Image (cartoon, grey):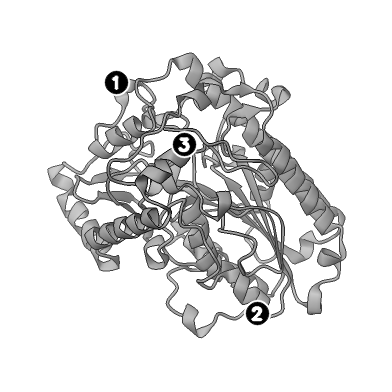
Amino acid sequence: MQPTNLLYILSDQHNRNLLGCYGHPMVQTPNLDRLAERGTRFTSAYTTCPICVPARASLATGRYVHQIGYWDNAFPYDGSVPSWHHRLREQNHQVDVIGKLHFRSADDDNGWSREIDPLHVVGGVGDALGSIRENASFRNKRGGIEEAGPGDSTYLQYDARNADNAVQWLNSSSANTPQNGKPWALFLSFVCPHPPYFAPPELYDLYPPDALPLPPQWREEEWPDHPALDYMRRYFTFAPQFDEATIRRMNAAYYGVVTYLDQQIGRVLATLEANRLAENTRIVYTTDHGEHLGGRGIFGKFSMYEESAGVPLILAGPGVPAGKVCETPVSLVDSFPTVLEAMGATPATEDADLPGQSWWSIANQPDAERTVFSEYHALGTETGVYMLRNRRYKYVHYTHQRSQLFDLLADPDECNDLAASPEQQPVLAAMEAELRALLDPEAVDAQAKADQKAKVASLGGEEALRQRGSFENSPVPGEKPKFKLV
């Protein structure tokens, strides 16, 4: 593969189904749809962890969460594990970032040539209250859902600024006169469509709430009956069910923010074209995890269902098959080798055991059988959760609780759990064996909880953290966090 520049665009909490190119009948995402038309779209892409901080640490390092120990939103990446940005910079590539990182601090050596207006975790600590897994402080997220609708937010403002900064970057010598004559990488990280659920009024109005399709199993009588999901709903105060009008209004706001995100990406892609950079730049679009939108009685991420663990993934540029749909399962852990291959960079010796594969190589091959992995050890759970997905089945393993099994070819909405089916016991056993060949789920769960207890103790103990309180969303640069007692 000939080395080129790389524009890696990451959003935050983008439900994979909410893109026109993924078949949604209403959502307006013309810029991302055009990107998919001239590139390759992946149908089975997944996060390594359905919550921000661990997913971003894993994306950076090319390693699974249990390998690097960035367990939850109080374990932010600190530059101590080599990242693909470190590898590029070591080889004299310019590698800049604009926008949300959710790392510990810009004072750390995170591997970038420059961090432009970065969003990092609160105070270099993040959401430490979420590290209390036993006798946890439950949170009431009902207010943010009930208030959803037309409006403004600092996240909308920040993403406009991120797009402005990207346009300025692409118009500058950084893009047009590459450092050392080598390809550059720009990691452009938007915070939308992450809550708050406020959309610009003119975009909210594009989506009449009563006309929107609602997510799977949104009615309380349809909610999946599983102790882990019951606990999650109690933890976030998602029960009892919101009234239908509220769910529809929240969905309309989310749709509006998705379209807003697409507009910002469109501005950046237009600038890339105007500067005649598109012919020598490969593009990645994906997100860190999805959004439930009320499906299964859950809002936000946190689970292994498709709307939470699944992510959109689009590749475009030189050497990428145009108009292709790839069904091979892929993962954000693949980012590390993907970036290095795109730019002609060389892995270090210590990268030889990375679990990922390059998306460019996968896109240029026929669809293949592959199993990808995700895990979760953060707030809203009592126990570690692990997922394996191959081309047909998804297996979800809950430590010390019953597993789930879904046939995604026959049941793409995951409404029929096959784990108790006598006919499916060989599949269930084979997938559990595959999981245990990768890790010891009980040991990893115990290690995560031990590390979390140590983290809590290092920050003054449980009572001190409860007095500190929680915050809904990480503030943008220049904004103060708004703590509240729980």
Which secondary structure lies at badge 3?
loop
Q: Position of residue 274 (x, y in %)?
A: 86, 53
Which secondary structure lies at badge 1?
helix
Q: Earlier in the sequence, mark 3 or mark 1?
A: 1
Instruction: Tell me the CA gap for discs 3 and 1.
Output: 20 Å
Answer with left or right where residue 278 lies relative to residue 458. right
Pick whichever, 448 or 326, lies toward us: 448
Q: Quadrant of residue 452?
A: bottom left
On-image quarter of the C terminus: top left
Q: Which residue is mark 2?
A: 90
Q: Position of residue 234 (x, y in %)?
A: 32, 30
Q: Which residue is mark 3?
A: 300
Question: Measuring 73% from the left and 48% from the top, which residue is drawn there?
Answer: 162
Q: Quadrant of residue 83?
A: bottom right
Whether residue 302 is visible to the viewer of this picture, yes or no, is: no
Question: Measuring 15% from the left and 46% from the top, which residue is drawn there?
Answer: 423
Residue 298 is tagged as: none
The amino acid type found where label 1 is placed reads: Glu
Pick whichever, 270 or 453, lies toward us: 453
The amino acid type found where label 2 is placed reads: Glu
Q: Nearer the viewer, mark 3 or mark 1?
A: 3
Q: Which residue is mark 1?
A: 221
Instruction: Tell me the CA gap for discs 1 and 2.
Output: 55 Å
Q: Nearer the viewer, mark 1 or mark 2?
A: 2
The amino acid type found where label 3 is placed reads: Gly
